[in-house]
Image: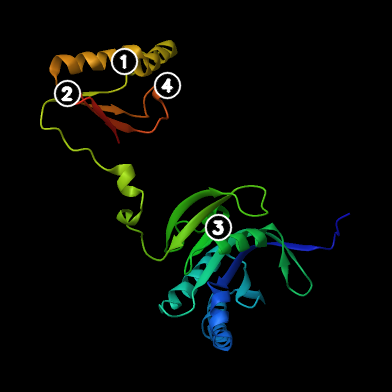
Amino acid sequence: MADATVQRRLAAILAADVAGFSALMERDEEGTYARIGTLRREVIEPRLTDHQGRLVKTTGDGFLVEFASPIAALRCALAIQSDLTDPGGLRLRIGLNLGDVIIETDGDVYGEGVNVAARLEALADPGGILISGKIYGEVEGKVHAYFEDMGEKQVKNIARPVRIYAVRLHPVSTSALPSAGKLFSPLQLPDKPSIAVLPFDNMSGDPEAGILCGRYHRGHHYHSIVHLLLVRNRAQLLLRVQGKGTGSSAGRPRTWRSIHIGRQRQTVG
């Protein structure tokens, strides 16, 4: 039976550690130990004081902090990372989560709220900050930062997937994303007359007609019409299939197909 005297409270938990700590210790044990001590005294503790954070414990290269406010927690994390810009200096990985935690008599904290923060910290890049969807829901529009939705991830020893957001001090250019060019590369405009064919749409309001439109859109009749237009005009057809229609096309992502009759080649964007 659970102890009725267990103390619990909702808290924003910040978990952080030094990236590459083991390698740093192997190269220079005493020097690394001294640098971590300096980091704690000159950066961590002053920033926690500025943002009303409570240092729960340290774990050699890492530390755990409790905040009453998710906004204060994120602002503190951003301030810490902005202080650590020296290319040759120590780099921290930070994870933030909001959850109900158990408070021990000695001040230590336990619970899934702590575990998720620790998992996010382990997934973060050196110098990076990852936050859970719970934190994001509280800080969006209230903290000057840039958020990148990383989607839901299954993290170690947590039953349910966790929605994760990466927090940036500066916006990330879409040109820097590796998949941006592949996903959104524009088609070259043709140098000959072209025909654009849209999916059939139900203008009558009759649901059965909507089903018919969907069948024609994806079936043999639709492609027969497209083929007839191509053969008669010998033009390049720029075919757009958009996901805002009715019938079977509803909800589908927008795609573009460029079909060249003479060369028997089809490219899909």
Q: Residues within 10 Å of mark 1 (few under 14, many from 20)?
A: some
Labelled disc at residue 248 = 4
Residue extending farthest to the right is 1
Q: Amino acid at mark 4?
A: Ser
Q: Residue at x 35, y 54 (%)?
A: 177
Residue designated by label 3: 135
Q: Secondary structure at mark 1?
A: helix
- Going from N to C along the chain, the mark reached first, 2 or 3, is 3
* Cβ atoms under marks 4 and 1 closer than 8 Å: no
Q: Secondary structure at mark 3?
A: helix
Alpha carbons under labels 1 and 2: distance apart = 21 Å
Front one among 261 and 217: 261
- Going from N to C along the chain, the mark reached first, 4 or 1, is 1
Rendered location of residue 263, percent (x, y)? 19, 26
Q: Amino acid at mark 1?
A: Tyr
* Cβ atoms under marks 3 and 1 closer than 8 Å: no
- Between circles 1 and 2, the one closer to the viewer is 2
Front one among 139 and 148: 148
Alpha carbons under labels 4 and 3: distance apart = 37 Å
Q: Secondary structure at mark 2?
A: loop
Alpha carbons under labels 2 and 3: distance apart = 56 Å
Q: Is residue 64 left or right of residue 6?
A: left
- Between circles 4 and 2, the one closer to the viewer is 2
- Going from N to C along the chain, the mark reached first, 1 or 2, is 1
Labelled disc at residue 262 = 2
